[in-house]
Image (cartoon, helix red, strand yellow):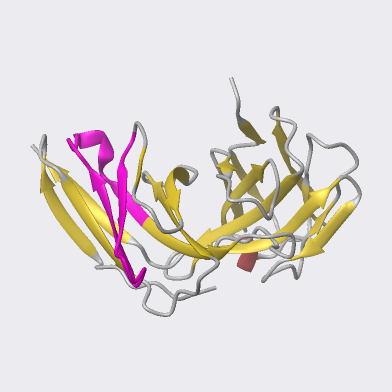
Amino acid sequence: EAQVTQNPRYLITVTGKKLTVTCSQNMNHEYMSWYRQDPGLGLRQIYYSMNVEVTDKGDVPEGYKVSRKEKRNFPLILESPSPNQTSLYFCASSLLPGGALEQFFGPGTRLTVL
Amino acid sequence: DAKTTQPTSMDCAEGRAANLPCNHSTISGNEYVYWYRQIHSQGPQYIIHGLKNNETNEMASLIITEDRKSSTLILPHATLRDTAVYYCIVRVEGSSNTGKLIFGQGTTLQVKP
């Protein structure tokens, strides 16, 4: 089944403790992206990747890192999480970023930073 | 990317057609209209997209006015599982596109028994 998977789905952590949220897609998509969703602010893009080893900042990249060493994986890294990074995170992918194509979203990761 | 305006909320009776409007009066010629939906805290789900012509797939129909300044998403026979927030998104396609989707506030559709 074509899908985007994220792990973990739920995470409660403490300020400053490094964490990684994994994202994987099995559709051989070139484009992957991370969003965060907060009440009243909607979904905002954090980082995106056009292809392997190519990443760029979205609208709210501060406090986050990403890597794209393989086509299928696009982990989101919080080196020193803070409470303002408590949010619902979504990973997305599509075959090509510029084409008139749908984007597939993962099920979400709900992160709480105490 | 052009700004969109949608009603905050709508109700629909189960089994009836749900018609969700979207205004995008500043749309330019190379911008597509996309619809996504998000069922409570799940990942957004693609529904349909179009440029000028009306489009239909297994989920919905998309009607775009001739001047392209507005569109309507039609769910022909709404079910309780169609209760969700529906987002109308306008974006340019092409090699310079960063792929970012700009989600507004959307329309909360409540399908009632």
Q: Could you tell whether A114 is left or right of A79 in the image?
A: left
Position of the C terminus of chain B, as image quadrant, is: top left
Residue B8 x %, y %:
25, 67
What residue lies at 68% left-to-right and 55% top-to-bottom?
A98
Residue B24 image-quadrant placement = bottom left
Span shown in magenta: B59-86
Q: Hey, which residue is sitting farthest top in the picture?
A: A1
Q: Could you tell whether A54 is left or right of A23 in the image?
A: right
Q: Hey, which residue is sitting farthest bottom in the picture?
A: B26
Residue A74 x %, y %:
78, 43
What residue lies at 33% left-to-right and 53% top-to-bottom?
B85
Residue situated in front as seen by the camera: A23 or A11: A23
Does the segment drawn in magenta span residue B108? Answer: no
Above-or-below relation of B92 to A95: below
Residue situated in front as seen by the camera: B95 or A41: B95
Above-or-below relation of B101 to B49: below
Q: How many labels does the image show?
A: 0
Q: Could you tell whether A113 is left or right of B88 in the image?
A: right
What residue lies at 33% left-to-right and 35% top-to-bottom?
B59
Does the segment drawn in magenta span residue B66? Answer: yes
